[in-house]
Image (cartoon, rainbow, N blue to C red):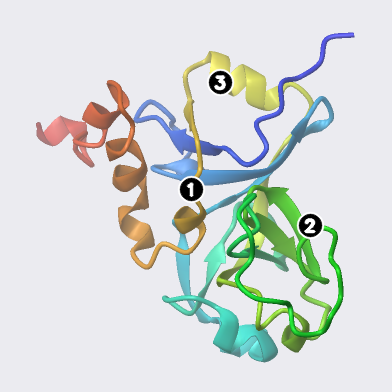
Amino acid sequence: MTEVSSLTGRLLVATPALADPNFDRAVVLLLDHDEEGSLGVVLNRPTPVGVADILQPWAELAGEPGVVFQGGPVSLDSALGVAVVPGEAGEHAEGPTGDGADTGGDGPLGWRRVHGAIGLVDLEAPPELLSAELGSLRIFAGYAGWGPGQLEEELAEGAWYVVESEPGDVSSPAPEQLWRAVLRRQRNELAMVATYPDDPSLN
C-alpha cells in the first residue's frame, strides 16, 4: 500500500503559475492531508466582515485584524477556528492551567492539535474555556479541499510550493503581505520568487 507522506501543518504557497483565481497568491495552511484527500484554510484572504458580526462570543479572542477570513471556496457558510496555543509545540506552557486539570499534553479542552502549537478550536465550546490558553485565534469562513490524489497532481504540475509553517503565520497582522513574507524567509531560490511582480506583463 502506498502511503501518502502527510503534509499536515505545512503551508502551500501558490506559485505564480497557478491560474485558479481562488488561489491567486494564496498561502494555505494544511489542516489535514492523507490518502483520502486534503483540507486547508487560506491564511491571507481577510473579508470586510468582523468576527463580532457573526461570532460575538469569540470576537475578543480573535487577533488583529479582527475580521473573518475566507478560508477557501468550499462551505462558505461554515466557520472554522484555528488558534495557536503558546507552549504547546513541545515547550512547557507557562504556569499552571489554573483549573488543576491535566491535559496530558493534548492542549486545552476545546482545542485539537493539528501541528505543533497550531490547532482547531471547537467554536461550539464556551470561549472562556480557552481564553486563558489561546495565543491567537483566527476565524475562517469556508475551506479549501482536495479529493484523493488531487493535491499530489497539483504539486506535480508545479502549482504550489510546500514550506514549513510558523505559528505566527496563522495570526499575521498583515495578511496581505503573507505571500511575500513566507517566500522571503525561505533559504533557497524561493526567496527570489517573493520579488515576482503582481502583473508580470508590466515588467
> Depth check: 108 or 4 in front?
108
Label located before the other in sequence (3 or 1): 3
Q: Amino acid at mark 2?
A: Gly
Of labels 2 and 1, the one closer to you: 2
The residue at the point 52 percent across, 15 percent down is 157
Q: Describe the element under mark 1 as helix, strand or loop.
A: loop
Dot 3, how many residues are within 10 Å of its Cα: few (below 14), some (14-19), or many (20+)? some
Q: Describe the element under mark 3 as helix, strand or loop.
A: helix
Residue annotated with mark 1 = 166
Q: Find the distance from the CA under tag 3 to the CA under tag 2.
A: 33 Å
Residue annotated with mark 2 = 105
Quarter of the image with the C terminus is top left
108 horizontally vs 15: left or right: right
Considering every residue shown, the one lying at the far left of the view is 203
The residue at the point 71 percent across, 77 percent down is 96
Of labels 3 and 1, the one closer to you: 1
Q: Amino acid at mark 3?
A: Leu
